[in-house]
Amino acid sequence: MVPLRPPGTVMRLDRLGSFHQCRLSFMRVLLRRLKREHWRFDRPIFDVNANGVGIAIYAAHGPERSYSLVCFAHDLPAEQRSDRVIAEAWDSTFALFDGVPTADDIDRLSNNVPKQEAGRITSKELSLSRANRSVRLFEHVVDSLAAGRQPDAEQVEAVGYLMRTTAVYGSGKFGAADRETIADRPEFNGPFQVEMLAVFLIRTYVLDLVEHLARSRSPEKAVALAPEIRRRLGIGNSTGLGMAPFLVSHPVLISRWIEAREKALSRVRSLPEATAHEWAIFRNMVARARLNAETWMSDHELQLAKLAKLRADLAKVEDYIADGGLIGETPWDRLYRWAESSLSIEGQEQLVSLMLEPYGDLIDDLADDMAADEGRSFHIDGAMPLDRLRSILVEVYGWALKIDWTSQDSLARVWYTSAEKLEPRLGERFEEELEPYEQPLAPARDAAAMAQNLDRWRGGPTVAAFLLAYPEHRHIARRVQIAAHYPYAEIRDNTIASTLQPIDLLRCKLSFFGAGHFDPRSDRWLRINMFKGAPFPNDLADEDADDWSYPPVQEAGPCASH
């Protein structure tokens, strides 16, 4: 087997911030399961008036359980519409209910869900979310359909969604069910499957809503969205710093995600040869990825530079294929090694995702190993010899020990939690009085500080003895011990440096969700698209659940899409 890429290569922020969705992304894992298990979907309630105010319920029925997305539609004045987490009103609000709600449940939810954080939900609810319209495109689509014509395809493609969520909360937040209560259910064993199911159903609600509003405006002339346009509309999302610390605060879980992806890459690179059919799938996916890159829009200078490199890199990959690069032994390993010296990091990580596409039978089982019981790793092994702790620390954090921690550039940022919304924030250490509120999200600095005290230590030989004298190092000692068992647990970069780009953290996590068209709006928040191109719930039985992440292309020759 080709060895897994070393953590020192993979866990750098510039690489993590160049990840793309792949077969192991959570949206695709969800849709494969829904199709495989023959889930059924219905809409028992759609009671929305001509002004777009009312309630709708979308139900998903699996082999053992049912779940219901309860949707509340609101007539929101334009001046109240905001993507900020501090907003207090939205165009639509949602809760994913465990089962089928009764009239009493619906009444309770109607008094709480529209208020979001100001209300309270219960353990019968698995997620809480809200969304706002993409006003320009939403109105264009409604107006077009009401006039009896299809919306402009270029406008649809440029925006890609009619609503964007500004939060999808789960795992106990605001009273929702704790993950531990549902993690043993097969459909929710994998990471973020509750949230992905909610967004999948929200997408159907949004498209039903625009068609309903068009019919309400013009009952005689209105038409439905053409299927090909409907498919090109996903759900947008605005994601900011609230998500950024996740990669630092969940080291075991992140290691499982990364390791699954690296194992998939290793399995493919280790194949002795590729069949003509596998070549055809890959070549088709490269062409589709190139089309995707051409339609991927952004105004952010960093993303524009990455997009330029990505488009050039995909052209290079097509030339490599045309020159017979996949002919012969170990074609995928040779391709990857060529990419290391020929493509940008953005292009390399896009290629990793594309190389996995022909090999679902070989790698899809790895999705079953991406969850983690993080509580099992919380215990600190006090009996561990300090020599062992030192050796792990040097192996994992050796790069951090070389940083000049007296430099203001190395210590420039402070992670803290806002008092107003209890959300993570990032401040400037030497410009604001924030250090008393700092969160332990700087493992590189803390590892270096512990290393200094270990060098001075003349006491007992165990971790327990050392931590009795230096309890401030408990959290980093725990991280060191975790890293001994989970190789991809630690980011190999300084998360409080002046050069930090928080959007790298956001993009890595969102790529595992399955998001696409990352569009940074600053270095601290971005917009994405989810489920764009995916089949709708009632189409799953008859369509491929996994062939939707890139736009289709027409190719001559035998390169049929898989």
Image: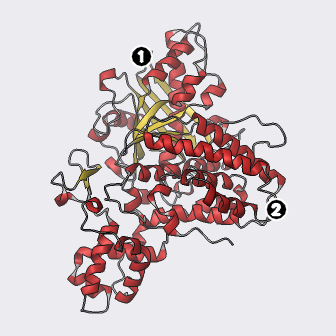
Numbered circle sitting on residue 384: none
Q: SS class of the residue under badge 1? A: loop
Numbered circle sitting on residue 328: 2
What residue is shown at x 19% (from left), y 59% (from top)?
435
Instruction: In the rendered view, tell whether residue 157 sits above or below residue 34.
Output: above
Locate residue 412, reporting x and y percent: 26, 57
Locate residue 438, reporting x and y percent: 23, 59
What residue is shown at x 59% (from left), y 64% (from top)?
262
Query: Residue 178's quadrant in the figure?
Result: bottom left
> The disc labelled 1 sits on which kind of residue?
Asn
Mark 2 or 1, which is nearer the eye?
2
Q: SS class of the residue under badge 2? A: loop
**Is residue 302 shown left or right of residue 6?**
left
Instruction: In the rendered view, tell whether residue 433 sits above or below residue 467.
Output: above
Asked if one can make out residue 548 in the rendered structure from this viewpoint, the answer is no
Name which of mark 2 and mark 1 comes first in the sequence.
1
Instruction: Name the residue nearer the viewer: 76 or 502.
Output: 502
Which residue carries the number 1 mark?
A: 51
Circle 2/circle 1 CB separation < 8 Å: no
Asked if one can make out residue 453 in the rendered structure from this viewpoint, the answer is yes
Instruction: In the rendered view, tell whether residue 541 sits above or below residue 191.
Output: above
Q: CA distance from mark 2 to mark 1?
A: 63 Å
What residue is shown at x 52% (from left), y 54% (from top)?
188
> The disc labelled 2 sits on which kind of residue?
Gly
Query: Residue farthest to the top?
Result: 220
Using a 10 Å C-alpha cutoff, classify the residue at mark 2 as few (fewer than 14 neighbours), some (14 to 19) or many (20 or more): few
Instruction: Name the residue nearer the viewer: 216 or 447.
Output: 447
Locate residue 258, reporting x and y percent: 53, 62
**Is residue 353 shown left or right of residue 257?**
right
Using a 10 Å C-alpha cutoff, classify the residue at mark 1 as few (fewer than 14 neighbours), some (14 to 19) or many (20 or more): few
